[in-house]
Image (spheres, helix red, strand yellow):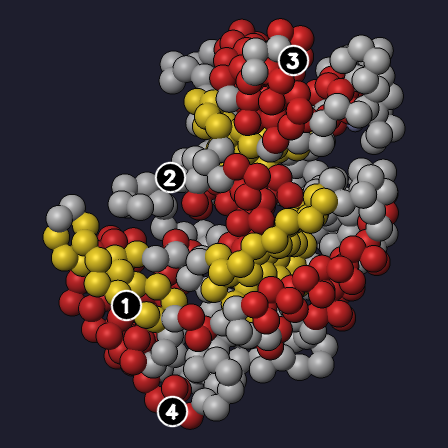
Amino acid sequence: MVASSGTIVAPVSSPRNPGSQSSLREANRARIVDAITHHGALTQVELAAVTGLSPATVSNIVKEQAAAGVLATTPTSRSGRRAVRVTLAREMGLVVGLHVSNRQLRVALADAGHQVLVERMLPLARDHRADSELDRVVLLIQDMAESVGTGLDEVLAVGVGLAAPIDPGTGLIATRGLMRGWDGVPVADELETRLRRPVFVDNEANLGALGEYRMGAAQGVRQAAYLRVSHGVGAGLIIDGRVYRGGSGKAGEIGHLTLDEQGQVCRCGNRGCLETLVGAAALAAKFPGSHTQVKLRDIVLRANAGDAAARRVIADAGRHLGVALAGLSNLVDPHRIVVGGELAEADEMLLSPLRHALERSTLATASGVPDVVKGELGERAEVLGAVLYAIDLAHITAGRPSDAARTTGPYPMGIAGPRISGIVPDLAPENAPDRGGLAS
Ligand SMILES: [Zn+2]
């Protein structure tokens, strides 16, 4: 199903006959499959709520698509009542999520129903380079696929999160110097050549935001920001229920917001960025004689054990972050800010001073200030966002009853739609159903 260029083509064509009964039914099938692709598992009652279709229509289409091998159903219960849980069938294929941050790499192999089958994490050397790491990633993905009894040919798409802004036009890292060994490397093309699968690249904080919006602490909040505080600092913005990337891919680069015009020179080349105050290197340097040997995890562990200096360093970081988030709050006005990354493990030691500084510096409105919460997905937010990104861009489509019998390929139905290399600016469809109000 994948041509040598990595282009996905639909195995069967879908003739359209606008206005007819069959085209209405086809549209309804697509709504159901899109809803499951977007939300993961839903009960039939939830499916009726998000699609606006009648319970009888949902039930008929689910039955038909289960028989065609597109959907899978399992009995479950909701509020003590019997229900039918609907997911995409495992046979629809797999996706890979890859997160390459500054000091570690995480890969998840998942099915199209959002279920992670196997996940691996590897530490990265300080000056890791794209060519050798991409070679390692390919071996790792092959090994992971084998461990669940399958191969690369079952992978529909690969989503990749990198620790730098990605230019939506070129798919390259938009700002040089933030991931030195990866500058100028067309990561999507390089990985596609090695894997012969479609690859889509985005910024890590955008994918973290997508993960928390669809599966974590920002569910149902259509105006939200995700702050990632790890080796570097970045933010992902959810505006009207969609990831907002800006014109050149740098939207949400809060780590490089100038907080002190006379401050230290940052790795981006500017002076006094937020990251020069709260990045991992800046925090480590605050411990006398330690230089950059102290890791973020150690600082959090020390603070949790009651070390006064570590607690103070984290509280100061919270205050700086709160001031920067006050600016972000005035500009994009999120209802909720989700804090993730390694430093979020400090919980209220970080969040309480952060909230205090945010409240003091942001413009007060009648509805108050944004709600600040810790992420629910922890260090997996980005890799899970990468999985969702891959599922969204694999364009999984519904099948007509006759398709299953005619198709001989590995996928009973099709993956269709335009092949877009690198990055796709708008992820969720305009009318994507909101997660709010659904039982999880
Ligand atoms: Zn900077």
- Residue 166 spot, x, y in % from top left: 72, 47
Q: Find out if the beta carbon at label 4 lies less than 8 Å from the nearest ligand 1 atom.
A: no
- Residue 41 spot, x, y in % from top left: 34, 57
Q: In the rendered view, would you say 290 is above or below 385? A: above
Tell me the CA gap for discs 1 and 4: 20 Å
Mark 3 and mark 4 residues within 8 Å of each other at the beta carbon: no
Q: Which residue is mark 4?
A: 405
Which of label 1 and label 4 is nearer to you?
1
Sequence-wise first label, 1 or 4: 1
Sequence-wise first label, 1 or 3: 1
Q: In the rendered view, would you say 260 is above or below 254? A: above
Mark 1 and mark 2 residues within 8 Å of each other at the beta carbon: no
Q: Which residue is mark 3?
A: 310
Asked if residue 428 lies left or right of residue 130, the reply is left
Going 45% across and 89% down the picture, which residue do you hit?
407
Which of label 2 and label 4 is nearer to you?
4
Q: Secondary structure at mark 2?
A: loop
Sequence-wise first label, 2 or 4: 2
Bin the neighbour count of mark 2 within 10 Å (Cα to Cα): few under 14, some 14-19, many 20 and up: some
Q: Find out if the beta carbon at label 3 lies less than 8 Å from the nearest ligand 1 atom.
A: no
